[in-house]
Each structure stands twice: as C-alpha cells, then as structure tokens.
Amino acid sequence: MSILIDVATGGVRGGTSILYAGVGETVSERSGVINLGTEGSMLGGALAAYVLAAETGNPWLGVLGGAIAGAVLSSVHGVLVVRRGANQFASGLAVLFLALGLTSLFGAAYVGRTITSFQNYAIPILSDIPVLGPILFNHDPLVYLSYVVVPVVWYVLFRTRVGLLIRTAGERSEALTVHGFKVKNVRMLAVTVGGLFAGIGGAHLSIAYTNSWFENMIAGRGFIAVALVIFASWSPLRVFAGAYLFGAALALGPALQARGFGINQFALHVIPFVLTLVVLAVLGRRTISAAPAELKRVFENAPPDP
C-alpha cells in the first residue's frame, strides 16, 4: 500500500504543472485555436518565476511573473494565428523554439541559484484522513489552488456569458459575427488566458516541485498537456483526472528506485510519453469527433494519411 500512496501523492504533485497547462489549453482549444507552444509558455513561466523568486524572495511574485511570461508567449502565437492567419501547428512550434532560445540565454545565470520556494503545508484534520489525507492534503499552495481553479474554469466555460462566447468561437464563429462580437478578440483572449495558466504550470515546476532551474526543464510536459486536452474531450474536469494519471506515471520511476528496484531509469522516463501514445491510439478518431467544430478544421488541414 505504501508504494501506491507514494505514487498517488507524487501523481498529484507531479501532475499539477500539467493540470494548469491542460486547463489553459482547454480554454484556448474551446475557442478553436490549438497551441503547440504550450511547452514554450510553461518554459517561459518556469524561468520568470524562478528569476523573480530568486531576486525578491517572494514565490508569489514568482507565480505572477510566470503567469505573465506564459501569457506573453501565447499572445505571440495568438497574433500569428488569429491576427495574421498563420498555420497553427507551425506557429506553436515557432513559439516553442523562441522560448527555448530565450530561456537558455537568460536562464544560464540562474542555474544553481537558491530561491525562497513554496513549502508543503499539511491541512489540519484533512491531512489526517487515512489514505486520502497524505495524497491530497499535504502539498504546496499551488496544488491547493489547482483544486479551485479547475471547477472555476469549468463554471466559467459552461455557465457564464464569457464561456459561451469562447465556446461559440470554437463551434459557430459566424454566430458571434452576426451578434456583433469580434471572433478574433474572443480567440485572442482565450489563447492568452491559456498561456497564463501554462505559465503558472511552469512556475509550479520550478519553484514548488523541483525548486530549481535548468535548461529545457519542462521536458515534454507541455505536449502531454495538449494531448491530455484532446483525449479529455475538452473538459476541464477530465483534464483534472488525466493530469494526475500522467503525474503518477512520472512519479512511478522515483518510487520504484527509492525501494531498490533495478529498473533502467531511462526506461522509466519514457512511461508518460508511451502512455500518451497509447491513449491517443486507443481513442483515435472517436475523441477527435468530439472536438469543437472550428478545431476540427485545423485537424483536417493537417497532411492527409498516405
């Protein structure tokens, strides 16, 4: 039972950065824009958060800086795609490479720097609940914040006027035009908000989870978040569960190694990505059929099968 609790606890901690990115990407894709640059927004958010935490000693300022950095990088994608009509896949990858270059350049001076990071806080009474207590209620503040963010984003998307505008932009964009709304403005808002959440996800990774900065530290989590949104059928609540599943896959390796299992660490590192491929292969077109109508057009414009 101990190893299961450790893996589940690690799944919550390790999956939180993916959760934030996945929720943000859900907002973006609900408006009809897919952002492969989510990885770049996470990377920019991770560095910005680490720099501000190192310079100010305040991790909350780091989170704010990470959110802003993620939003700025995603807005570049938004301008290219929404304003200029660029290919969504090419633009997202370009933003990723931009983030890789910028963070490698400006982050070199912060490798090995110590920071004031978030610390785990056990919630009284709740953390004492058998099994669930240590899994859910002995974490850093950003994990607890994610418990609130997911239902709030769900409520905004499906129960408010703003959410209706975002979903209409992704389903029937012409309806917005008929009613006097500018589709491009709605999509720019959604893409920028998506990057903001991805930046917070990156911030969690650098100043709460690893408490360190190193080049390309996101290591594919942004791409996992994009895939997660697809097989979660663009639902923030399903993203919640899926992020923890991938977090558990990330936590499995350290848990096994800590108990002396002689398994190649590189083999363990590929588990989350193999899981991603397997899930996408199993769900296939059934999941894509649930995509917002405007997003289907993006997928259909991809190169056809040979």
Image: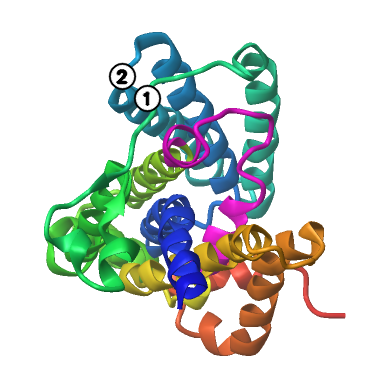
Q: Which residue is label 1 attached to?
A: 62
Q: Amino acid at mark 2?
A: Asn
Tag on residue 126?
A: none
Which of the 4 image quadrants contains residue 189?
top left
Residue at 35 percent of width and 11 percent of height? 56
Q: Is 112 situated above or below 200?
A: above
Is residue 249 shown left or right of residue 78?
A: right
Residue 178 visible in the displayed image: no
Q: Crowding at label 2, few (<14), some or many (≥20) Cα neighbours within 10 Å?
A: some
Q: Say if mark 2 contacts mark 1, CB within 8 Å.
A: yes
Percent coordinates x, y for residue 168 in the rendering: 29, 66
Percent coordinates x, y for residue 156 in the rendering: 18, 60
Residue at 48 percent of width and 45 percent of height? 82
Q: Which residues are magenta?
A: 203-229
Is residue 22 shown left or right of residue 254?
A: left
Q: Which residue is label 2 attached to?
A: 58
